[in-house]
Amino acid sequence: MTTNYGAEQIQVLKGLEPVRMRPGMYIGSTGSRGLHHLVYEVVDNSVDEALAGYCKHIYVTLHPDGSASITDDGRGIPTDIHPSTGKSALETVMTVLHAGGKFGGGGYKVSGGLHGVGISVVNALSEWVEVTVYRDKKVHTQRFERGVPVTDLIVKPSKDDRTGTSVAFKPDDQIFTTGTEFDYATLAGRLRELAYLNAGVEIHFIDQRLDLLKSNEPKVEVYHYAGGIREYVEYMNKDKQPLHDEIIFIQGERNGVQVEVALQWCVDAYTDNLLGFANNIRTIDGGTHLEGLKAVLTRTMNSIARKRNKLKENEPNLAGENIREGLTGVISVKVPNPEFEGQTKTKLGNTEVRGIVDTVVGEALTEYLEFRPTVADAILEKAIQAFNAAEAARRARELVRRKSVLESSTLPGKLADCSSRDPSESEIFIVEGDSAGGSAKQGRDRRFQAILPLRGKILNIEKTDDAKIYKNAEIQALITALGLGIKGEEFDSSQLRYHRIIIMTDADVDGAHIRTLLLTFFYRYQRQMVEQGYVYIACPPLYKIERGRNAQYCYSDRERDQIIASFPENAKYEIQRFKGLGEMMPQQLWDTTMNPETRSLKQVEIEDAAEADRIFTVLMGDRVAPRREFIETYGPRLNLTDLDI
């Protein structure tokens, strides 16, 4: 153990060393999310060229060797010698952190890039990068390996006037230890999103991994939406029933900040789905643009309700969540000097944006609705119904609440709580039925693990109004046990009683259904809790294989087959199939599913918010036709022998 702590212990990391040493700081994680973030960083540079008005086509290609390439027809990265580094501008942006054209030097008016680290981070975390720049009737190429240039800038003459940049890279498996295979659906969601946000830009997505596709031809998709975010709202609402056919579209600019808003209310939705973007970056934690939109919607609709005599003088104003019930909306702002929280940019902090959104949307929305009184009336009637339902729900809640015998809180009687009062170390297992609940209660570590058994299948809240939700005993137990508050209110993580909410259901069809109903409940009742990563799914074993005194647990058929294959030919063994958690002894349940040292948990994440919303609507909503179409489309792809029926 060293006791001397002097100047020689202070390390100075040079060049791109800090990125390889602490990659999570720059890309969020070294798992799947960070891996895909590399592609986003390069694509965002091409989109910034599009925002500046120089790029119309972007090609994203996944290659069989595990690499990806992004090509655009923008201006091309500058290649002349940089005055302060003495190297080409291309090598400078590739190898120097905080070097870029987005610090206000006149290269870009608006951009998603801020810190000048994006492309150099991709370079640092890739096994190799090859950059090709087309500009000034020349082709410039340079190759880098793990952040270090291995060739000089090679310049060749070009026959045409082509301009643009092509970046090919292969992620480094020394950094991304969980795998470097890109997921098509994850990337497609983000590329589609970018095409919606930048009307007119054409993004081609090509997957050439024929072995993975099990096909002889590459998979090609083109995203090009002339209608921009209007088409985005249309896409999200295509399986819902709109309250008004025309999507309300508002566009304006104040003090260099561009604002675009698209809104449409739906009859058959009881929650709002508002997506916020700042400079093309999805701000999942909100920010001043979304706050401004929510405030102006509430104020404008209440003002119109008073004018049209929908609300009497002595009646209270409609709350924001009442007005937003059934609303699908997208707000996209382009800010010259955005302030984000952190490199992964999940929340916009510019205070002036709130006022700009308020002004631009307030004027346009008032004018729009005054010329279309039928639309205004339909939205207000839905909001008033929501207000009445919320009042009924509040009364129902008051009736349902009952005091626990043990303490003065209003916790449900069947909750076996943990002794810890620190939410960050506490976790709750939501289990189906009392038999599984009994095993879990006996097997748990009562210091930090709570158990909440649910009886039967909970209500599908996709199809229900708020009053029914609060009258349902099982849902009431969930709300009070978790500390969720009221539906539609801003999520406050400090009120959450447990920071790991674990769904633990049987490994059969009923268990899968209950899990789906619970995920629907969390997604629709308090989506931010899911987005911020508090919800998990437990992975109980399917089989127990006993051979002599040794017992092994298997979590899949493949694992079971591998273990059996490892036995000698004449070996005697017994296989037990766990149909339900109640069949497991408390100690078995602890060892396999509940012990933090040995268990596996799946964290529930939302990669593509619009697609998640649409899938919940199709599968859990009350319209049969879209669900039937979904089953007919994807049903034939299922291997029926895999279904536990």
Image (tube, helix red, strand yellow):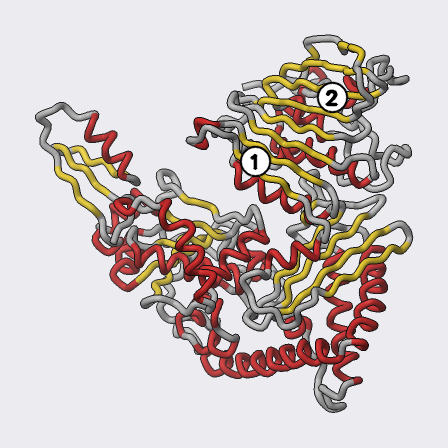
Q: Which residue is mark 1?
A: 220
Q: Residue at x 63, y 59 (%)?
A: 234
Where on the picture, by quarter, is residue 489? bottom right
Q: Residue at x 65, y 60 (%)?
A: 274
Q: Is residue 115 above or below residue 447?
A: above
Q: Which one is in front, 91 or 168? A: 168
Under mark 2, the amino acid is Met
Can residue 480 be seen here? The reply is no
Q: Position of residue 58 (x, y in %)?
A: 70, 34
Q: Position of residue 426 (x, y in %)?
A: 46, 53
* Contact flag, marks 2 and 1 (Cβ < 8 Å): no
Position of the N terminus, as image quadrant, is: top right
Can residue 568 be seen here? The reply is yes
Query: How far is mark 2 from mark 1, CA to CA?
Result: 29 Å
Q: Which residue is mark 2?
A: 94
Q: Which one is in front, 472 or 209? A: 209
Where on the picture, by quarter, is residue 157? top right
Secondary structure at badge 2 equals helix
Q: Is residue 25 above or below residue 488?
A: above
Under mark 1, the amino acid is Val
Secondary structure at badge 1 equals strand
Position of the C terminus, as image quadrant, is: bottom left
Q: Residue at x 58, y 78 (%)?
A: 390
Tell me which numbered mark, 2 or 1, is placed earlier along the sequence: 2
- Left or right, residue 168 beside residue 261: left
Mark 1, Cα crowd under 10 Å, few <14 / some 14-19 / many 20+, is few
Q: Is residue 320 above or below residue 519?
A: below
Q: Nearer the viewer, mark 2 or mark 1?
A: 1
Q: Position of residue 154 (x, y in %)?
A: 76, 9
- Left or right, residue 506 beside residue 186: left
Q: Which one is in front, 611 or 531? A: 611
